[in-house]
Image: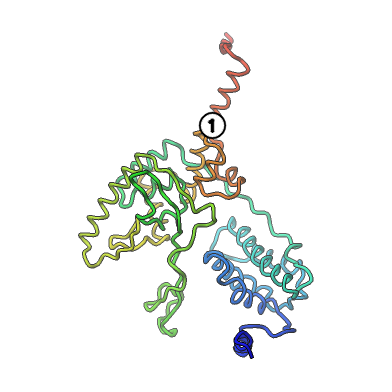
Amino acid sequence: MTEKVRRLEKHREQRTVPTPGTRWTVESWLTHWLDNVVTGHVKATTLSAYRVAVRHHLIPGIGAHRLELLEPEHLESLYRRILTQPTKFSAETKPATVHQVHRTIRTALNEAVRRGHLPRNPATIARAPRVVPPDIEPFTVDEIRRLFVAAAESRNGVRWVMALALGLRQGEVLGLKWTDIDLDNGVLTARRSLLRPKYAHCCGGTCGKAQAGHCPERVRINPETDTTKSRAGNRQVGLPPQLVTLLQHHLHVQQGEHVRAGNAWHEGGWVFTTETGDPINPRTDWSHWKVLLQRAGIRDGRLHDARHTAATVLLMLGVSQTTMMSIMGWSNPAMAQRYAHVVAPIRDDVARQVDELLWPGLESPADPE
């Protein structure tokens, strides 16, 4: 018996590999797909989203169905139930949740078809509800400048300048290390993304906390960082000279914090840290963003709106789509239409150019008496 056969036999004994002729339920297939097929082959954030969709929606909703008997109508019924069930989230988020569930089951069943467990994929036939994208209003140039002023008075304030000026994603900014920034040549390299921590109980169920993150003996179960969102996200971005100056000042301030913290400092080379050198939790970072908006007297907005704002600024500057894609880390040209918004200054400039082309040298008509 070869070593490969021995390993397969061991897996079968442990019930981690299905035996030929397995009659799958939706639950058993999704569980197998998560644990043995996609794990190790997709990004940690993607796997986490799959697990949420499977455990919170798909298994409770359709898990008992025989896999080969699953029909599009079963999925559409599940989608309707998700849309109508009470939830702590807003009504606007429900279609997006359904779409995540729909993408997950479609991907899982595509694999079942590929392996011969299904003749067709019912999820490719089922209709998911239409997602209406939210209305995004990028921050104006005046609002950006006011945010810069408020950021100058905040700890790690240059973090917000980088978001608004360069359009880096939250995880990309928080995942920056000083080795990623060439201050002499004014170049930043986005290589990684800091992940939100996920925890598991390690107390044997004695702590009484519902959330594993509150367990005093919690254990982190996901990596600290991951690669950028896509291959295009791994990119170099030029730094405006003023931003280089701000980063140099930030480095000086951080070195002072290191000295004051002494042995309590955890050196990780991060650009943006807590007062003891640890990377900043993305949830804490989001809270700091909300405080910054209030301090600047700016309307409420999502943190991701800073990325929309940066793309819109590039559009206002007349940057080509290819260059914009490189700076923003996009692999799909359609993202420019989603993120770069035609705001009033752009509309006014186009109107002026049309006026000068079609009515050259003509004065505006006099007002009627």
Q: Residues within 10 Å of mark 1 (few under 14, many from 20)?
A: some
Could you say which quadrant of the image residue 57 lies in?
Answer: bottom right
Placement of the C terminus among the 4 image quadrants = top right
Could you say which quadrant of the image residue 184 lies in?
Answer: top left
Give how far across and how far down residue 95 sits, in percent. Answer: 63, 58
In the rendered image, the vertical position of residue 116 relative to residue 133, given as above or below: below
Give how far across and how far down residue 85 sits, in percent. Answer: 62, 66
Query: Which residue is depicted at the point 72% across and 65% down?
Result: 123
SS class, disc 1: helix
Give how far across and how far down residue 254 sits, in percent. Answer: 27, 54
Can you identify the residue that label 1 sits on?
A: 346
Query: Which residue is depicted at the point 32% across and 47% down?
Result: 247
Give how far across and how far down residue 91 sits, in percent. Answer: 59, 57
Q: Given the image, on which type of amino acid does mark 1 rest?
A: Ile
- Identify which residue, 41 or 185, lies in the foreground: 185
In the rendered image, the vertical position of residue 11 relative to residue 326, given as above or below: below
- Identify which residue, 208 or 271, lies in the foreground: 271
Is 162 on the left or on the right of 367, as rendered? left
Could you say which quadrant of the image residue 37 lies in?
Answer: bottom right
Query: Which residue is depicted at the point 42% across and 60% down?
Result: 282
